[in-house]
Image: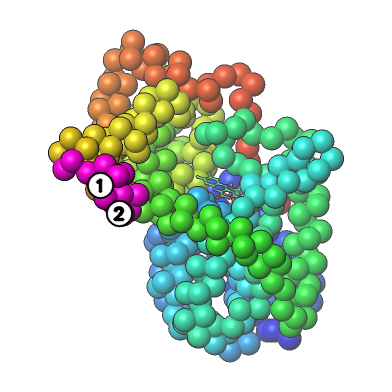
Amino acid sequence: MYGNLNIYYFTGTGNALAAANWIAGEAENRGVTASVIQIAPSLKAFDFSVGPDTLVGFCYPTHGFNAPPVVIDFLLKFPNGNNPVFLLNTRAGMKLSKLFTPGLSGLAQLFPAIILLLKGYKIKGLQPMDLPSNWISIHPGLRQKVVDSIFYRCEKITKRFAAKILDGKNVFKGLVSLPIDLLISPISVAYILLGRFALAKTFIADSHCNNCLLCEKECPVKAIVIKNERPFWTHKCESCMHCMNRCPQRAIQTPHLFVAIIWWLVFLVLPFFILKELFQITPESAQYYNLIFDIVTIVTGFPVIFFSYRILHFLLKFRFFSALISYTSLIRLKFWRRYFAPKMYLRKN
Ligand SMILES: Cc1cc2nc3c(=O)[nH]c(=O)nc-3n(C[C@H](O)[C@H](O)[C@H](O)COP(=O)(O)O)c2cc1C
């Protein structure tokens, strides 16, 4: 069917790359030349010419019920064309006893698909893939046995999907959960507007950091800079979890108590106080109170989050404060496993 396959991928902890490699392997078995290309801020989409007989694929994780902003940005810059295209978003797969539980896509496929449709591409496949959840800020990494069994299952599903797409068929498994995806779409929008910045500002390096600079070097979006001899997460951070899962010293933390207090202020107390005390607006007096509340949250939330992160970063200089902050992070606990896709799946073509 196709002469070439170009798969563009973004990954934090390897899942999307593993899926891209499985699809590329399937293509090569059929004599299709496959290229697996990493989406990075330095990669300009328009540098890539896509030939007429090229099948184009995008593999990326789901972040906040959406595609990561770096992927959306890349798609917006992607040249117009009429090639067949597929999208595969990796999600937070888990396993409860023998039951594999899926993640949730939200707009992670729909939004990129609309962008590509508007650019003239023909959507051939929408496929979610429930690879192990990597979100170790909120839960410990899955046990190796569980990771292995999720990978075993997903490899088979991905290869089946690839075979159908390479045979020229359409596969729209991603649309099965459309009602739920649309229902949670307001959260996807909130994540893009504010949530992702709030999350990016939850990372710190505690006193175990030995300045090896691996996090800075390996950050897929070059969001980490060194300030006061410590890693500092800029607003470009995608919260992809690469740094936290890779740090050899296990020094990267989310100080949960501190974060909970700041978020409580930003998302609840501050907008409520501003509306009530400064503008005398209450749920009873304003028809669109919820909308006004959300707008005030976004407008006031940005400066508070950015400013409090700077203060936090400054205070980390002091040993007592650093110990206190690190003590409020669940991630420092010994049993809190890290997660990365097994190495054998990360070989790039
Ligand atoms: C900040 C963040 C947000 C996430 N949001 C979602 C989500 O909305 N839905 C979901 O199913 N999984 C979500 N996940 C889980 C990842 O999408 C999932 O583990 C994915 O397979 C990771 O792929 P990667 O290793 O290629 O980065 C999220 C993970 C992170 C770190």
- Residue 220's label in the rendered image is none
**Position of residue 100 in the picture relative to residue 188 (left or right):** right
Q: Residue furthest top?
A: 320
Q: Residue at x 78, y 75 (%)?
A: 164
Marks 1/2 in contact by CB < 8 Å: the verdict is: no
Query: Could you say which is closer to the camera, residue 125 or residue 25?
Result: 125
Label 2 sits on a secondary structure element that is loop
Looking at the rendering, the stretch of residues picked out in magenta corresponds to 279-292
Residue type (three-letter) at the residue carrying disc 1: Ser
Is residue 45 in view? no
Query: Could you say which is closer to the camera, residue 257 or residue 72?
Result: 257
Disc 1 residue crowd, few under 14, some 14–19, many 20+, Cα 10 Å: few
Question: Can you say which quadrant of the picture contains the N terminus?
Answer: bottom right
Check disc 2 and report the residue beneath it.
Answer: 287
Q: CA separation, marks 1 and 2?
A: 7 Å
Is residue 261 in view? yes
Check disc 1 and report the residue beneath it.
Answer: 285
Rendered position, 29 above or below 122: above
Q: Residue at x 18, y 41 (%)?
A: 280
**Position of residue 338 in the picture relative to residue 322 (left or right):** right
How many callouts does the rendering have? 2
Q: Residue at x 62, y 30 (%)?
A: 140
Quarter of the rendering containing residue 323: top left
Label 1 sits on a secondary structure element that is loop
Provide the major secondary structure of the magenta segment.
loop
**In the image, residue 131 lies at what x, y percent?**
69, 49
Residue type (three-letter) at the residue carrying disc 2: Gln
Q: Residue at x 46, y 37 (%)?
A: 214
Rendered position, 19 above or below 213: below
